Amino acid sequence: MAYVPGNLTKLAGNGPAGPQLWHLTGVDAIATVRGAGFISNAKDAGMRVGDTVIYQDTATPLHSLSRVSAVATTGATMTA
């Protein structure tokens, strides 16, 4: 399934520096979510390298933590 921008929520970290905490829900496998550019609006949403994302797979239900390793105009890349 495709990324749904409305499923991404910033939970903490509104300052100009320091990490932020995000929550994302969906039905995709974590390997897909961590793929380059999956969160396609990452730059517009304000994601930064070093941010933490809690991903909730609502189909399983599993939770995973990821760190944003790159942000580009095409989206974010995350690692475990």
Image (spheres, rainbow, N blue to C red):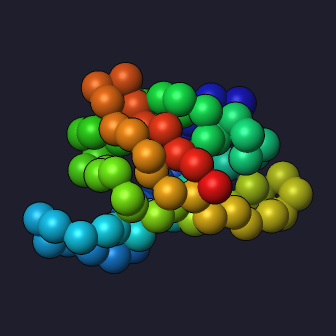
Q: In the rendering, at what x and y percent does residue 28 appear?
A: 74, 41
Please tell me which residue is depicted at 40% across the width and 31% down the height of the picture. Answer: 75
- On screen, residue 64 above or below 75: below
Please tell me which residue is depicted at 44% across the width and 46% down the height of the picture. Answer: 69
Please tell me which residue is depicted at 63% across the width and 41% down the height of the picture. Answer: 33
Q: In which quadrant of the rendered image does the N terminus lie?
A: top right
- On screen, residue 12 above or below 24: below
- On screen, residue 15 above or below 71: below
Q: Residue furthest right?
A: 60
Please give left or right for residue 59 compared with residue 25 in the image: right
Question: Splitting the image into 4 quarters, where does residue 18 fall?
Answer: bottom left
Please tell me which residue is depicted at 67% across the width and 48% down the height of the picture. Answer: 26
Total number of numbered discs in the rendering:
0
Q: In the rendering, at what x and y percent does residue 55 appear?
A: 63, 59
Instruction: Judge whether residue 3 can be spotted in this image.
Output: yes
- On screen, residue 45 above or below 63: above
Please give left or right for residue 43 compared with residue 5 in the image: left
Please give left or right for residue 27 compared with residue 72 in the image: right
Q: In the rendering, at what x and y percent does residue 35 appear?
A: 61, 33
- Front-lying residue, 50 or 41: 50
- Front-lying residue, 1 or 72: 72
Q: Residue furthest bottom?
A: 12
Q: Residue furthest left?
A: 16
Q: In which quadrant of the rendered image does the C terminus lie?
A: bottom right
- Front-lying residue, 55 or 59: 55
Instruction: Judge whether residue 55 can be spotted in this image.
Output: no
Q: In the rendering, at what x and y percent does residue 41 appear?
A: 36, 35
